[in-house]
Amino acid sequence: MDQSEVRIIKTAILNEIEGEKFYVKAAHDTRDQDTSNAFLHLSEDEKRHQVMLREMLAQLAAEKDIIVDKYNLHGTPSPQIFNAARTMDTDNAMEISVFHIAILMEKASIDYYRKAALDTSLPNARAVYEHLADWELQHLDAMENIYDSLTEDWWDKQSYSPS
């Protein structure tokens, strides 16, 4: 068993656990129910990623080929909860800060999976890492859109808007 491949997957699992825990905490700490639901949806995606990665690790440990056909690599569409988050009250900058941290986490995940895809010698693992990078990119796009909207609203309320 190639220890560098094992290290890639173990680190990815830990990254996903950190993301899951962050989103659950963010869901509990936010005042807005729609935003809380958005974070819980993201935590569920992070759990799905963990399951896939743990299965890959088990296949690798058993010295079997990594089988990607059994994984749903397309994610689950958000039930439009991100649109509702745009209407949240931005008097409290904490929610904005949480979205900013989430953006940084998603960028780090994308970078990690892209690097893992380059570093792995296993074609099927490469395919999973590329799909996970794309999945995290969907999270990032949603987060950036919400963050931009919330930030503009906050600036307007603080009279920081350039207009």
Image (cartoon, grey):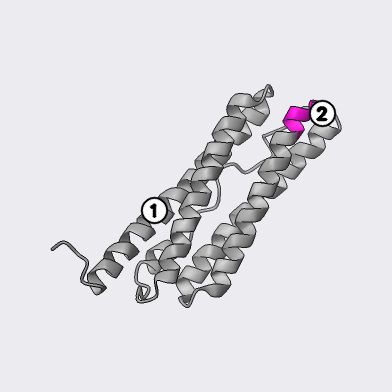
- Depth check, front residue: 32 or 77: 32
Residue receiving disc 1:
144
Query: Is the residue marked by circle 2 packed among few (<14), some (14-19), or many (20+) residues within 10 Å?
Result: few
In the image, the segment drawn in magenta is 1-6
The type of residue carrying mark 2 is: Lys
Q: Main secondary structure of the magenta part?
A: helix
Q: Quadrant of residue 52?
A: top right
Q: Identify the residue shown where x is 35% and y is 76%.
A: 91
Q: Is residue 90 visible?
A: yes
Asked if residue 70 is positioned above or below residue 160 in the image, the reply reads: above
Q: Quadrant of the N terminus?
A: top right
Residue 79 location in percent, x, y? 47, 62
Q: Identify the residue shown where x is 60% and y is 35%.
A: 129
* Circles 2, 1 touching at the beta carbon (< 8 Å): no
Q: Quadrant of residue 149?
A: bottom left
Would residue 49 be found to the left or right of residue 105 on screen?
Answer: right
Q: Is residue 135 visible?
A: no
Q: Quadrant of residue 142?
A: bottom left
Q: Is residue 95 magenta?
A: no
Q: Using the image, tell me which numbered label, if any, was put on residue 64.
A: 2
The type of residue carrying mark 1 is: Glu
Q: How many marks?
A: 2
Nearer the camera: disc 2 or disc 1: 1
